[in-house]
Amino acid sequence: MARRTVIAYFCLVLLTLFVFASCGRDLDEPPGGKITVVTTTYPLTFLAGRIGGDRVTVVQLVKPGVEAHDFEPAPSDIRTIANADVFFYNHPAFEGWALAAASASGSGPGGSSQASAIQTVILETEGEDHGGQEINDADFDPHVWLNPLLAQKQAGRIIAALITADPDGSTEYVRNGDGLEAELRGLDELIAAQLTDCALDTVVVSHLAFGHMAERYGFNQVGLAGLSPEFESGPSHIANVIRRIDELGIRHVLQEPIASNRLAETVAAETGTDILVLHPLAVRTVDEAKAGEDYFSIMKSNADTLKTALQCG
Ligand SMILES: [Zn+2]
């Protein structure tokens, strides 16, 4: 009898271990495996990761340290999109290749079933905030995530898309989204508080990525380059920037981490100004990714940079 009891206990313990082992791997994981989310750039990776939590695996196409405006998808990227449950990109004015890549990813043999499995969600916020500008308007600033309240709108679209792809996760997506929204609102308040009582109202930036931030917090940006860093600024434009730095008493040139420093260094040397980092956040640097820097930590650094450059408080 005792022996049988021992065996029974042993079996019970084994069974318990087995149950814990299979559940303990990931309690929140969907029964069919994690939802595969493919993103173009870092802000979408961050938002989808926070909202999706343990239910999703997020794959970012533009790798850390790569200038996002230059990116063109390789055939392997098209295959990655084809295998996604959800594909997020920001805006055709930023990833002009994304829609074509999404449709190409479903065009192979059996493509129609693949395409139907992909839910392409255009994360643009044109309309109420931008006077109804056309999607392909060359003047549209696609860097919407740099205003935390617009990032919140993107988060709303990501929540809706994840619920469509994985209805069983809706409670978790909504809960995670609520926490994220509170944090984004807190960030917005923090930046607004830091950028009050400023001596200056204009910053010089490496490219015009900060229009939505400037609009939200009440400053102007002067770009060494335009909406895309590739825009070649002519000597007369640079001479004009140098003249405005002198006229306005600007003491800093704000340079992004993933771009050539040459122009910023030339202008800083010419005007006797210092260079500070202001991060457009389309992708993180390799070091930032390794160090676990995220949207919030980098945005807080941006707020510190702007506070210094605008001479606030
Ligand atoms: Zn940009």
Image (tube, grey):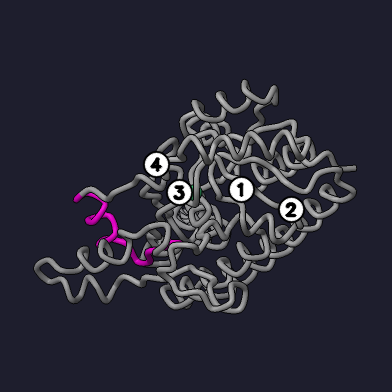
Does the Cβ of the disc 3 residue fall within 8 Å of ligand 1?
A: yes
| Circle 2 SS class | loop
Q: Which mark is residue 219?
A: 2
What amino acid type should be assigned to the residue bearing mark 4? Answer: Lys
Q: Would you say the residues marked 1 and 2 are in contact, meaning their CB atoms lie under 8 Å apart?
A: no
Residue 308: percent from left, percent from top: 78, 36
C-alpha span from label 1 to label 2: 21 Å
Q: Quadrant of the C terminus?
A: top right
Judging by the rendered image, the residue that carries numbered circle 1 is 295
Mark 4 or mark 1: name the one nearer the start of the chain.
4
Magenta region = 75-90
Q: Which mark is residue 213?
A: none
Residue 254: percent from left, percent from top: 64, 36
Judging by the rendered image, the residue that carries numbered circle 4 is 63
Does the Cβ of the disc 4 residue fall within 8 Å of ligand 1?
A: no
C-alpha span from label 2 to label 3: 20 Å
C-alpha span from label 4 to label 1: 16 Å
Q: Residue at x 18, y 76 (%)?
A: 112
Q: Is residue 96 left or right of residue 1?
A: left
What amino acid type should be assigned to the residue bearing mark 2? Answer: Phe
Mark 4 or mark 2: name the one nearer the start of the chain.
4
